[in-house]
Image (cartoon, grey):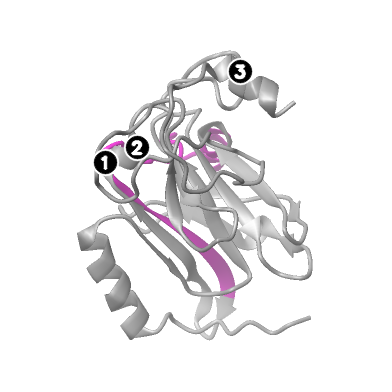
């Protein structure tokens, strides 16, 4: 198995990310094996499929395995930029090239099990930072290392808009088909559909008339 160092992220990379964050949406990858692929912070539809629309339960974050081997996700955690405590311990095994979606309802279930405040994924609708972290055994005991971090802006977190990588993982784009964005902030509108647990195949399109969520679900059946 490939040995991945458990060192702190380079200072220059962290400082670069903080500069980009101040300018708008930004991503910073600190390890090449796994990344945050797409984020939806302001749900207006029943994304987790429980029959209810809930601002907390229907938020979601999609994770992708970039590596050539399966990744056991039990040592990975998600949290936002407030505080040091994770909002969700991930679970399952993610095969090479595959994605998995974790919903706010998953976070609520884990928080309930842990006996902590049930805040869900706590994705701020006005813009936020999402961190993917991994636990490891450090010289002084258990510790956490930052694996991937995403900062998204206010316009990326309007009703049923998601933001994430395009199909080639070369650009961070806006998936705004359900709620078209006509402004000029980066990332601009593309007309792409949010695609939880499906490939992000839509690139560089012009925003078009939004579709109902029922029609979206029909596409992914």
3 and 1 marks in contact (CB < 8 Å): no
* Camera sees residue 160: yes
The label on residue 215 is 3
Residue 75 in the magenta stretch? The answer is no
Do the CB atoms of the residues marked 1 and 2 lie less than 8 Å apart? Answer: yes
Q: Secondary structure at mark 3?
A: helix
At which x and y percent is residue 103? 55, 36
**Front position among marks 3 and 2:** 3
Image: 50 above or below 12 = above
- Please report the bounds of the magenta region as a residue range: 107-136
- Residue positioned 59% across, 46% down in the render: 200
The residue lying at 27 percent from left, 66 percent from top is 20
Q: Which residue is mark 2?
A: 157
Q: In the figure, is residue 70 to the left or right of 90?
A: right
Of mark 3 and mark 2, the one earlier in the sequence is 2
The residue singled out by tag 1 in the image is 154
């Amino acid at each position: 198995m490939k040995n991945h160092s458990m060192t702190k992220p380079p200072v220059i990379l962290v400082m670069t990310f903080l500069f980009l964050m101040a300018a708008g949406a930004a991503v910073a990858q600190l390890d090449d094996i796994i990344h945050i692929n797409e984020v939806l912070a302001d749900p207006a539809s029943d994304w987790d499929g429980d029959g209810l629309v809930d601002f907390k339960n229907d938020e979601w974050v999609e994770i992708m395995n970039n590596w050539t081997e399966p990744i056991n996700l039990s040592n990975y955690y998600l949290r936002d930029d407030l505080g040091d405590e994770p909002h969700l311990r991930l679970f399952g095994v993610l095969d090479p090239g595959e994605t998995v979606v974790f919903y706010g309802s998953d976070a609520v279930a884990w928080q309930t099990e842990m006996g902590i405040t049930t805040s869900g994924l706590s994705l701020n609708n006005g813009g936020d930072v999402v961190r993917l972290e991994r636990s490891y055994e450090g010289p002084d005991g258990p510790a956490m290392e930052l694996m991937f971090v995403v900062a998204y802006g206010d316009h990326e977190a309007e009703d049923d808009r998601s933001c994430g990588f395009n199909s080639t993982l070369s650009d961070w784009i806006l998936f705004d088909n359900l709620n078209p964005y006509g402004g000029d902030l980066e990332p601009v509108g593309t007309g792409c559909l949010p695609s939880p647990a499906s490939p992000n195949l839509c690139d560089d399109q012009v925003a078009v008339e939004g579709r109902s969520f029922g029609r979206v679900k029909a596409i992914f059946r």
